[in-house]
Image: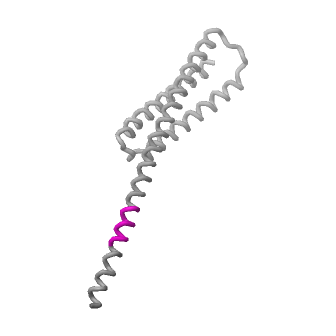
Amino acid sequence: MMRIITLMNQKNHYLEKFYSLNESELLRMAKKDFDNVESFYQMRDKILELIRYLDAQIDRLQADSDGDITQDIRRQMRECLNIKDEYVNRILAQDLEILSCIETAKSNIIRELQEIRKSKSAMGRYKSGLQPHRRLNEEV
């Protein structure tokens, strides 16, 4: 049972790393710095892989256990689960913020592209408006 608690603590450690990674990336995104997004998502995936591995190990050990759990072990497991729940809730809130930052940046890019398209269209109309005038002068 102590091995399960060790694995639960390791899982909480990686959840903390995940939370810290999100926090630092949120600060970058708040400054409109999205240069690190690809490596950010790769790091998140690696941490999630480790957490999935730890979950599998915990499940395997639980299935192999005899079921005798002391009060102290129960208390430690409850503490680990409470910490995990706290990190999961914080991470979910961060993910909503991250999605909001990305959605805002995406909307801004779309708006800028639409403005560029309008400008090009206006320039095209302006240029095409000058050409017939020149042709008239040439014909005279």
Q: Is residue 95 above or below residue 73?
A: below
Task: Tell me the quarter of the picture where residue 60 sits.
Answer: top right
Task: Tell me the quarter of the picture where residue 121 sits.
Answer: bottom left
In the picture provided, is 132 more to the left or to the right than 105? left
The one of 54 and 90 positioned closer to us in this rendering: 90
The one of 25 and 13 positioned closer to us in this rendering: 25
Residue at the front extreme of this rendering:
140
Residue 135's spot in the image, x, y percent? Answer: 31, 85
In the picture provided, is 101 more to the left or to the right than 52? left
Count of numbered badges drawn on the protein: 0
Question: Is residue 10 visible in the rendered structure shown here?
Answer: no
Magenta region = 117-126
The one of 35 and 74 positioned closer to us in this rendering: 35
Task: Tell me the quarter of the picture where residue 24 sits.
Answer: top left
Q: Is residue 37 above or below residue 119?
A: above
Question: Is residue 78 visible in the rendered structure shown here?
Answer: yes
The one of 6 and 23 positioned closer to us in this rendering: 23
**Colour scheme used in the picture?**
one colour
The quadrant of the rendering that contains the C terminus is bottom left
Residue 97's spot in the image, x, y percent? Answer: 47, 35
In the picture provided, is 70 more to the left or to the right than 79? right
Q: What residue appears at the point 72 percent right and 17 percent down from the top-left corner?
A: 67
Q: What residue appears at the point 60 percent right and 16 percent down from the top-left corner?
A: 78
Q: Tell whether position 53 is magenta.
A: no
Dominant secondary structure (helix, strand or loop) of the stretch shown in magenta: helix
Q: What residue appears at the point 57 percent right and 23 percent down from the top-left corner?
A: 85
Q: Tell whether position 123 is magenta.
A: yes
The quadrant of the rendering that contains the N terminus is top right
Residue 86's spot in the image, x, y percent? Answer: 53, 22
Q: What residue appears at the point 33 percent right and 71 percent down from the top-left corner?
A: 126
Residue 14's spot in the image, x, y percent? Answer: 50, 30
